[in-house]
Image (tube, helix red, strand yellow):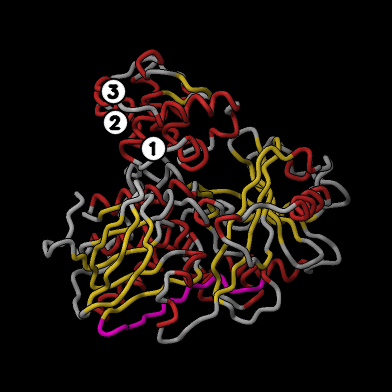
Amino acid sequence: MQTPNARNDVYDILVVGGGINGCGIARDAAGRGWSVLLCEMGDLAGATSSASTKLIHGGLRYLEYYEFRLVREALMERETLWAMAPHIVWPLRFVLPHHKGLRPAWLLRLGLFLYDHLGGRRKLPATRILNLKQDPAGAPLAGDCRLGFEYSDCWVDDARLVVLTARAAQAKGARIRTRTKVTAVESENGLWRARLETPEGEEESVSARLVVNAAGPWVDRLGIASQAAEPRRIRLVKGSHIVVKKLFDHDRCYIFQNADGRIVFAIPYEGDFTLIGTTDLDYAGDPGDVAIAAEEIDYLCEAASGYFTRAVKPTDVVWSFSGVRPLVDDGASAAQAATRDYVLDLADAEGAPALHVLGGKITTYRRLAEAALAKIERALGERRGAPWTDGKPLPGGDFPQEGYDDLVARIAAERPGLPRALIARLVRAYGTETERLLGEASGPADLGRHFGAGLYQREVDYLRRHEWALTAEDVLWRRSKLGLRFSVPEVAALEAYLTAPATPESRMAEAGA
């Protein structure tokens, strides 16, 4: 499956960066017949792509900045991505309380009307008006909230979307190398020569006809960004989120307006929690060192407390995460107003083309990849295939959009000895590949060692063998969110298992996963 071009490790395309944009481009390119090598210096989705608000959405607030093309494209992608991966993408309903003194009700109605009609909505329910004094969504809210609006968007497990896209790229022939840093890229006789640092600290070199610089917040640090035909200024914007014990019992989400013009989401998260975010702050440090600041925690707690009857305090925070978005600097005065649209800059150094990926949002990654392939084909002077990813499921996503409950019920009926809650979680992560993961297992004893919170050895071995997971962090915070339920000793035990030298028995067990 990992077959380079026959010309002595000369690839058609070297993709630098294993976030959603890099993996999306690698998948599309490999599916059109290009030989592709993707290098990620850490874990897949190890930075920005696992630090989103976990939404597939048009971006209601972007209408205020007249980003109509971006919003339309994103709205159209919601149901496309839901169909591609119904195990990790599913619909949500958002409640927007009207706050007197902020955006007027007529403006909210107009924005939601456009939201409903710009993007070819087919299955997602339309907007409706709520009486928050009668609707259950009003019960957790403080003050005199009477008028509300309810609209549709979708949820996504962002890190799993990246991993499954990388797996789909690999299935089409791309070579995926994690923990492999591109330390230098130089043009040489019409090719790019890249120096790589392997996980073992050794140096290698490969050649490629074209480089895709999808390094996210490191996009201007690869050493070739300055050669772009139209150099762009990058604006690094930090977004942070907090997770607290759940603040309400229903399955709808909230979108709250704040007096500073920002909005904050409150979203049901992992069954027992509520996710609150995000902030928008300019960032000047090393993207690898990003972390939430105390001021951001205070801001999110105060924003949520302004709407909920139950106050949210910094001591309630059980987890937080931050990411740095590499946005195109469009001159916006406020970080939250900076465009989320993407720009693809094509450079040429002595006949060796490079494509720099700037900006973008997780919702439009597939469309970004299609636009990137159009530029790549022009740069390389060849066309090897038409756009093909629309309608093609990601691994485990080959079941009906609304078929999750039926799939859980079928697997549970076939394996009555396994806890239904475990099956439901596995199907949410792996879809139809749950059966491959479980193999012949008919009860918990068949799943091997239990590490805690329903995580068994068989799943860990599957993640290590098929999804590039190497550390406890990879397993607990990107391939799953079981870190919310793990104790410190359980994390240490899992890490010890993952780093232990392989034995013949463990190799056999892993091969069966």
| Mark linked to residue 503 | 3
Q: Please name the residue shown 37% across and 47% down the image.
A: 164
**Label 2 neighbourhood size at 10 Å, few (<14), some (14-19), many (20+)?**
few
Q: How many marks?
A: 3
Q: Earlier in the sequence, mark 1 or mark 2?
A: 1
Q: Is residue 206 above or below residue 92?
A: below
Left or right for 411, reference 296: left
Distance Cα–Cα, label 1 vs label 2: 9 Å
Q: Which amino acid, by three-letter code, is at mark 3? A: Thr
Which corner quadrant of the image does residue 103 belong to? bottom right
Circle 2: element type: helix
Magenta residues span 336-351
Q: Position of residue 389 (x, y in %)?
A: 31, 60
Q: Is residue 251 above or below residue 53?
A: above
Residue extending farthest to the front is 202
C-beta proximity under 8 Å, tags 1 and 2? yes
Which corner quadrant of the image does residue 499 belong to? top left
In this figure, which residue is indicated by the disc labeled 1? Answer: 430
Front label number (2 vs 3): 3
Q: Earlier in the sequence, mark 2 or mark 3?
A: 2
Distance Cα–Cα, label 1 vs label 3: 27 Å
Assign the C terminus to one quadrant of the image: top left
